[in-house]
Amino acid sequence: MNNVMEIKNLSCYYDKIRALEDISLSINKGEIVSLIGANGAGKTTLLRTISGLNKSSQGSIIFENKDITKLPSDKRVKAGIAQVPEGRGLFSVLSVEDNLLLGAYIHKGAQIATDLEAVYKRFPILKEKRLEYAGTLSGGQQQMVAVGRALMSRPSLLLLDEPSMGLAPIIVEDIFAVIKELRDMGTTIFLVEQNAYLALQYSDRGYVLENGKVVSSGKSSDLLHDDSIKEAYLGG
């Protein structure tokens, strides 16, 4: 597999508190790679550092063979990285369609309409509700808008932060079916998910984060059967 992203010895501070310490990991083209860990372990911080919303204090981020460590966040979007943030981050008083179009701000021309129709094909309910305020949608529908908005930038790497948060189990199944479909169509995915069992079920490989450090990694199938992982994150 071709390497899409390699993170080397990455550290990040909040004020004087070290949130990430000496993180090294890799993501290969066409994979779903999951990042699991307890609340406060640094999972969201790592995603925000990859997308450029947080600055790293040391280490490097190599994306598609280019060093993007110092690149501003908007340039990272143009390079092919899109993030679906925890809590979705929608503009509640804008329409569904306007929220989606915001994801295409780096593009111009007729392709935007084609991309929009592709999102509507993947999430038909959004076409039905395209003129409604995003804030009036159900949690699951809002998550669809957040994913669709990210896809409008045509990413080669999609960062997903807690896609199952606050959703009913049947909706979670739908969202993860879409995640798997996106991977099968060629989008590489780095997934942060509090539900460790779900994350490892759907991913190819996984990393375990504790107190800002990677403490374990491997094939997801192996992590699912690791006794220490099972005890700490999978309910024994």
Image (spheres, rainbow, N blue to C red):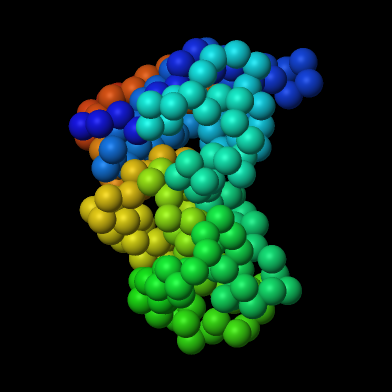
How many numbered marks appear? 0
- Which corner quadrant holds the N terminus? top left
Q: Residue extending furthest right?
A: 15
The answer to whether one can see residue 66 in this image is yes
Q: Position of residue 3 (x, y in %)?
A: 30, 29
104 to the left or right of 80: right
64 to the left or right of 212: left
Tell which of 85 and 68 is nearer to you: 68
Q: Residue extending furthest front?
A: 109
- Which corner quadrant holds the C terminus? top left
- Please tell me which residue is depicted at 48% across the width and 61% down the height of the picture: 152
17 in relation to 188, above or below: above
* Image quarter of residue 90: bottom right
198 to the left or right of 125: left
Q: Position of residue 127 (x, y in %)?
A: 47, 82
Tell which of 97 and 234 is nearer to you: 97
- Please tell me which residue is depicted at 26% across the width and 56% down the height of the picture: 185
31 in relation to 218, above or below: below
* Image quarter of residue 4: top left
The answer to whether one can see residue 235 in this image is no
- Please tell me which residue is depicted at 62% across the width and 73% down the height of the picture: 98
Q: Position of residue 182 (x, y in %)?
A: 32, 56
30 to the left or right of 21: left
